[in-house]
Amino acid sequence: LRLIVDRLVPGNVRFPVLVDKIGAGVFGLIAGIFSTGILAIAAQLLPMGPSIVGYSRFELDEREVTGVRIPGPSQLQDLVIENELKSSTLSPSEASSMGPLPVDSMVLGLVSHVSDGGSLAGDRPLSAVHPSYLDELFAHRLGPALGGDVLVTNSSGNPLQVSAVFSTESVLSRMADFELPVVRAGQVPEPPVGAVPVVVRTSMSPPQGVNVNAFNMGSIRLVVEGNNYYPVGSLQKGQTLLLTKPDDYLFVDGSNPIDLVFMVEAELLPLKEGGNQRMLPQGSFIQARRAARVDLSGKEILNYIPSADNVGVVEKDPRTQR
């Protein structure tokens, strides 16, 4: 193509001065938008809090909590909860853009477009792996443990494993708030209606030398048919659904498995051929902490709860408020 163009246009192409000035301004603006958009995305990849230079993709709250008993001396203290997510979900409809010109969304929009049969096309388009990349980056920055170990890979060191996927209405029969009432202040999260619970039993080995694995629920996502689903809670020993928000921080003893509950629309879960058992469609996967990913394409969804003696997270004790 270059040789053909050089043959057809052997010299420089000259435009009138007015056209040249206007064109330079327009294309300079486009270059500036993409340069700024790349920098904005890079800033959101940094290990900072949910708010970056005063900008937060989802609305945050700050409030004071009174009468909290802290470890140590038996006394009550007043604490300030900062950067708490107001909503119980990370719905794209509630996301806000970065100023009047959403340069980060514009860059991702173009990349997503050209990855779907365009110049950056691959095995799958960007939207199939990262349906809402900016929401994912925000979710990773939720939780209080800044500077901690937030990366896990599918290697022999820190593997992510999925032992079972199941769904039964009994999952929603008994629910409780994971957080302490004094901290939640009545803002109890609720699972969305019009969807079925899909429970993924996972296990993540903690970092070397650490006996407790800590993570926030926003760092784990289930992707089904180009949609991000974050856990609405964890099923404790197959009995009680402990409801959580994406910024709630959970702790697991060692590499004990946990049952993560996702609410997925039933029409996205096809029936197994020749039966009434549902399965996860092709392209489905679960990802934890950016790097660890397990392919769940065609995974059968059991219609019963497997044995769950040691499955669950470390619960908080309302008596000691710990």
Image: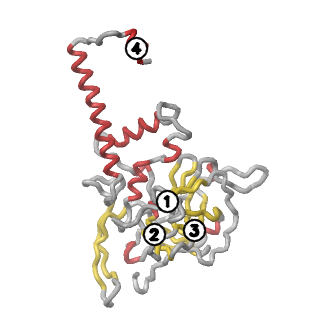
Q: Which marked residue is nearer to the observer: mark 2 or mark 3? A: 2
Specify which label sits upstream in the sequence, 2 or 4.
Answer: 4
Please report the residue visible at 49 percent of the width from the left and 42 percent of the height from the top. Answer: 126
Which residue position holds label 2? 207
81 w.r.t. 110: above or below: below
Q: Which mark is residue 5?
A: 4
Asked if the residues shown at circle 4 and circle 3 are in contact, with their CB atoms under 8 angstroms apart, the answer is no
The answer for how far apart the CA atoms under marks 2 and 3 are is 20 Å
Q: Locate the N terminus and report the quarter of the image it occupies.
A: top left
Tell me: 135 left or right of 303: left
Q: Can residue 102 be seen in the rendering of this structure? A: no
Horizontal and vertical percent for residue 3?
42, 15
Q: How far across and down, in percent of the image, does residue 149 sit?
A: 40, 66
Task: Give the crowd class for mark 3: few <14, some 14-19, many >=20 residues within 10 Å.
Answer: many
**Disc 1 packing (10 Å; few <14; some 14–19; many ≥20):** some
Residue 8 seen in the figure:
yes
Q: Secondary structure at mark 4?
A: helix
Q: Tell me the amino acid under the disc marked 3.
A: Asp
Q: Secondary structure at mark 3?
A: strand
Marker disc for residue 172: none
